[in-house]
Amino acid sequence: MGVRINLEVNGESYEREVEPRQLLVYFLREELGLTGTNVGCETSLCGACTILVDGQAIKACTQLAVQADGSSITTIEGLATNGDYHPLQQAFWDCHGLQCGFCTPGMIMAAADLLQRDSSPSETEVRQALKGNLCRCTGYHNIVRSVMTAAEGGS
Amino acid sequence: MGSVIGTSVKRREDPDLITGKGKFTDDLALPGMLHASIVRSPHAHARIRSVDTSRAAAAAGVVAVYTGQDIADSEAGGVVPVGWLLPNLKTPAHPILAVDTVRYVGDGIAVVVAEGRYQARDAAELVAVDYEPLDAAVDAKGATAEGQPQVHEEAPGNVAFDWDLGDKTAVDAAFEGAAHVASIDLRNSRIVPFAIEPRAALASYDPEKGLTLRMTSQNPHVHRLLMSLASIDLPEHKIRVIAPEVGGGFGSKIHHYPDEAIASWCAMRIGRPVKWTATRSETNMTDAHGRDHVTHAEMALDGDGKILGFRVETYAAMGAYLSTFAPCVPTYLHGTLMSGQYDMPAIHIRVIGTFTNTAPVDAVRGAGRPEATFLIERLMDLAALETGLDPTEVRRRNFVPADAFPYQTQVALAYDSGDYETALDKALDKAGYAELRAEQQKRRDAGDSKLLGIGVCAYIEACGIAPSAVVGALGAQAGLYESAKVRVHPTGTVTVFSGSSAHGQGHLTTFAQIVSDRLGVPLENVDVVEGDTGEIPFGMGTYGSRSAAVGGSAIAKSLDKIIAKGAKIAAHLLEASESDLEFADNAWSVKGSPDKSVAWGDVCLQAYLAHNIPEGIEPGLEETTFYDPANFTYPFGTHIGVVEVDSETGEVEILRYIAVDDCGEQINPMIVEGQVHGGIAYGVGQALWEEAVYDDHGQLLTSTLLDYALPKAHQLPSFELDHTITPCPHNPLGVKGIGEAGTIASPATITNAVIDALAPYGVRHLDMPLEPEKLWRAMHSGEDA
Ligand code: FES
Ligand code: FES
């Protein structure tokens, strides 16, 4: 009853047999052990599970693992290059963009998607782009600062 | 001593969390691990006629199905107890799985344990429960009315307790001579605490070693104690509770719930690890909710706007069962706060705690203090209307003056230190208050459809509640001290084992700063360990803005002991008198002859070599403190909100939010500011959008994020922060607390601003959440909802 899928995650190729109904987020967490992608709601409303699929931010609880067949995925674990933090990771650290850190991987991935599209967003644009990602700890103030800081550094 | 305190050191927690390496409870897996899913009542109130588990037990992957009866038949205590008692409190038992009656939507009935997460959830749907539905009591006040369904037989009229504080006679007399009376009827809405990480537990059992329970906990020792005392059949020393990374708490992970006990019971019964992780709707249904007060209050003032007396009657919902600290929240964390920042000569408050067929209600960020502040600060605005004074002026006339501390209130508390007027002035200045009022007048004169509102809230918080003997006399079934073991290693590096338990507050960083500052050792030579009953001394955990003031002070005390012992060894090595030594720059030296000194590292090494230490001194350098504060600490501040209400749609936009807070000394200003930001957003959520709504049948209408509206990034402005520093006079660090301040101030700040915007329509009060439709109706039907 399993379905065979091939996909690339953080630059590594995987071939796995999955249950057709398995959500992509649980595939990443439980099959591949990539637990950096968190689950806050399972209903596509909190954004904690945000990852990049073929370069685009999606909520990994809204997709089935089988739908990711043939795609290339980046999770929070794959964002740093050669041990150097991604500018967003660095900025979240520098600007106190996280407290409990549960929303952080999803927040960073959603911000990465934004900065790919727009390298110097305004504060309003940052806030709009992150409205699908909930944070209960920071009041978003320092998250927004982190994203703006990363954008400034990268442009 | 050093300068590490007061510095915005970057958090050492972060590298793991920004790379996905941090392990939250649900990230953990153990060999042979099973998954549990709990069958929950869809009824608010029903009798259980029968439970048929046969189909579920036969389903794919299912290992076991247990009911409340199975737990009742076992050796386990099988209940979750209440940890705070009041006189004549009704304490009906709360079984971890219901046996014959369910009392709220989400009450657990059975548990399915299966090989896979999906298998457990699927099989849970196959458990057939035959219910006899009963009517439900839902409203905090309405539940006490004649003829209402009874939630518990032993609590007639659904009254859990009837408590009062203050001098009723004096208050009645004060009202006799009043020139003005401001009165209000309000409902402080019910909210879901809503940590983004749902509650979770991973229990594993070894008959020899006992139970290891990894769980989403703000206080692992409290969970271990209650688990052992009442829930499962295992002595305390055979239980180890570990809090891995915890994804926010806001109070919801203080309490001892049935679910973690159920997972533990199953792991012991089956002999394999069992994981339970709440779904989002389970979290919304079963995490203890917050607030839910129905209040009538009146304030008497003289002709100059000075407060003469204050009387309050509040019905506070407890929900279906008494959660861990529930009885304390509307009483000792709310009733005792009724003086606010003001010199009130007479106060009386009565609080009636009521059982309702809803989720239990307990401490949620601020816990009682946001409710108190909301009530007082709404009334101060109404007092301004009654007296014709500006809202800031009526506050100013009533402040406890800066030279009146310590200040004894009429409701038990004695404020340690404060300077309320300075904080108000700083906030007014930062806001440009006069210009804002002028702009408001201009818009009003022009009939602008964008109504400008300015809201002011001057709050007091009582945190680090203590000392233990006092809270014990008030009903706490626990002490409220904090522990800290400081272990100095032979090479002079340090590990701190703290009873606090962070879940976002950054203790690994701030506590290391305290050590580095006092000892003069580099930050990187200090590690902090928390959240594991197997490693740390008995600790009370993190809530109530207590960790810096109580947990941090415990560390400071242990460091004092370390320095004192080190001085003895140093004096011995220097052949000097201990009283001639001073400790500075990470060394002991003879006062006046700095070349006669011995370095920190040499003393540490000698403490462990013990080849040459003074007689009567034990080897080693490790000290433990259980710090029991002399008093609460009392942070305070003034917040100002500026909002725009669209008179055509009722939409509210927050234009500016100014916060001036005083939490005493600041260990790490960056973290302090972060706490304020998050706290403000938390309270703004309640003011504008969030509400846990039950219908008349006790159905929770807001169990998912589709119906429960959390604040989002685009709905909030960047906040404008400043502070004053009035040190706490009675703890070694001079610190107060900041975790809840924002949440205590912002519901009143925003509500006052919105009502101020609506003043031209004669609106005097509206209950939270201030949704567009409610505002539109208030403006266009002229009704004072
Ligand atoms: S878990 Fe996917 S959006 Fe919440
Ligand atoms: S940092 Fe805790 S939810 Fe965002």
Image: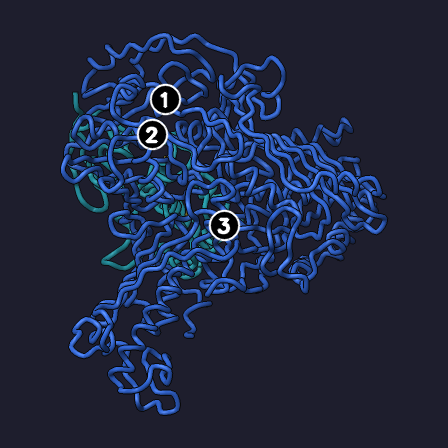
Chain colours: A cyan, B blue
Q: Is residue B686 left or right of residue A87?
A: right
Q: Amino acid at mark 2?
A: Asp
Mark 3 to mark 2: distance in Å?
28 Å
- Host chain of mark 1: B
In 3D space, how far apart are the residues under numbered discs 2 and 1 (Cα atoms)? 8 Å
Which residue lies under the disc numbered 1? Answer: B108
Q: Is residue B737 above or below residue B34?
A: below
Q: Are marks 3 and 1 on the same chain?
A: yes
Q: Nearer the viewer, residue A85 or B403?
A: B403
Residue B31 in view in this figure: yes
Disc 3 crowd rating (10 Å Cα; few below 14, some 14-19, many 20+) is many
Any mark on residue B465, and which? 3
Reading the chain from its start, which is encountered first: label 3 or label 1?
1
Q: Residue at x 29, y 9 (%)?
A: B52
Residue type at the position of mark 3: Ile
Report if the beta carbon of the residue with label 1 is closer than 8 angstroms to ligand 1. Answer: no
Does the residue at mark 3 contact the one at mark 2 (Cβ under 8 Å)? Answer: no
Q: Which mark is residue B306?
A: none
- Mark sitting on residue B259: 2
